[in-house]
Image (spheres, rainbow, N blue to C red):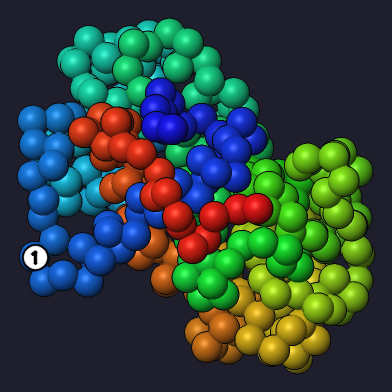
Amino acid sequence: MSHRIGHMLGIEPLSAEEIVFLLDQAKPFQEIQRHPLKKLATLRGKTVALAFFEPSTRTRISFATAASRLGADAMNLQAESSSVKKGESLLDTVLTLDAMKPDCIVMRHSASGAADFVARHLPIPVINAGDGTHEHPTQALLDALTIRDRLGKLDGLNVTILGDILHSRVARSNIHLLSKFGCRFALSGPAMWLPKEIECIGPPGTSIRRVPRIEQALEGADVIITLRVQQERLHEPALSVDEYVLQYQLTEQRLAGARPGALVLHPGPMIRGLEIEPAVADGPQSCVLEQVTNGLAVRMALLFLLIGSGADASPAKESPYAAD
Ligand code: CP
């Protein structure tokens, strides 16, 4: 079976087999990051349009670097200094970019569904680099690659997600992905950030518990995903920063309640001293910088599959990581 990928809009529609295939495709690109000469000519002559309508450090630079290391050119929309500021619509903006003939477009937008909308109007592949509170698929893929590398598997893990789950596309994409491998979830944070609807994500029978007490949520965790807390959102329920830190910060003491060696992930940007104690962020269980490096490999693989000769690639027949 060959895996032809048209767009990368979200994790939800992908099967476990397709996810394993994508992660396997990233392996050789992980090797390239360790090589002194990192530049390939695989996508020479191709152009990747980067249209970020929201701020980004990791994702935008990661895609730009992935394109460059594959030999492609990048076309960069700076939303702050673009005609978006003059009232140009999303559709007119992306049609304008498309008229300059890029081979794909990577986009981030504050509206959930924006990437799907653009994919319906452009003739080129669209990669969702984060849309509102909906999905951030390449973040979930790089997280999964990091977890699989460290633990040797994705199946049946206990995953704890901490913080502002209500507004988090990272949480949704990770739940979509890891639930396809039978992972169980404990979600913890202030009650107003733990929506009941989140329990319905994932295939029927997925175990998703909302656990207000962080200590209880961490019991037996193999993987802990800490989310960024936006300080301005703390005013919504009138929870002070000090109170958040006291009740919900991932500290060394709390981490000791998880499985020994439990992985700590954070998508960034990370607010040290708020959602995570610096000693945890910099400790041996932290995967934060590894996640960033793996992001490059995942995005190189994706660009190769979408606009390179990898569009005809077949999945590794006997992947040691294959899902049941
Ligand atoms: N993880 C992530 O999406 O980070 P950026 O907002 O910096 O891209």
Q: Is residue 163 above or below residue 278?
A: above
Is residue 230 visible in the rendered image? The answer is no
Say what amino acid the circle numbered 1 marks: Leu
Instruction: Say which quarter of the image contains residue 42.
Output: top left
Q: Pick whichever, 290 or 29, lies toward us.
A: 29
Badge 1 density bin: few <14, some 14–19, many ≥20, Cα 10 Å:
few
Depicted 245 relative to depicted 72: above or below: below
The image position of residue 304, as x and y in percent, is 26, 39
Identify the residue at horizontal 51%, vertical 75% (top origin): 150
Q: In which quarter of the image is the N terminus?
A: top left
In the picture of the structure, the residue carrying the numbered disc 1 is 37
Q: Total of numbered circles in the picture? A: 1
Residue farthest to the front? 318
Quarter of the figure with residue 46? top left
Q: Is residue 235 visible?
A: yes
Judge left or right: residue 291 versus residue 112.
left
Q: Is residue 157 left or right of residue 316?
A: right
Under tag 1, what secondary structure? loop
Q: Quadrant of residue 72?
A: top left
> Residue 283 in the image: x percent, y percent?
54, 88
